[in-house]
Amino acid sequence: MPPMRRKGDLPEKTCAQCGRPFAWRKKWERVWDEVRYCSDRCRAEAKRMPRKT
């Protein structure tokens, strides 16, 4: 098994809706390049409203 990584060492992105940073999660391992939102709530809001500029 590979060694454990600290949360501070994981890659981060900024949410396209709220602008907050969020860290990599195991469930996003295969689709990390496609992840744009930090939560289901932000994804739903992005579909309802036009994008912030």
Image (spheres, rainbow, N blue to C red):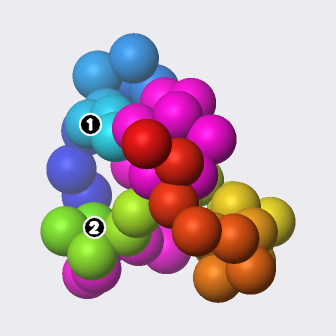
Residue at (39, 17) in percent of width and height: 8
Task: Say which element carries label 2.
Answer: loop
| Pick the front one: 9 or 52 | 52
Q: Which residues are magenta?
A: 14-31
Quarter of the image for residue 1 reads bottom left
Q: Is residue 6 magenta?
A: no
Which mark identifies residue 2?
A: none
Q: Residue furthest right?
A: 41
Q: Is residue 44 left or right of residue 36?
A: right
Q: Position of residue 48 (x, y in %)?
A: 74, 80
Look at the numbered discs 1 and 2 and tell me whether their residues touch, using CB distance below 8 Å. Answer: yes
Q: Depth check: 38 or 50 in front?
A: 50
Query: Which residue is rendered at x = 70% and y = 61% of the image?
Result: 42
User: Main SS type for the magenta part?
Assistant: loop
Residue furthest to the top in view is 8
Question: Which amino acid, mark 1?
Answer: Pro
Q: Nearer the viewer, residue 27 or 47?
A: 47
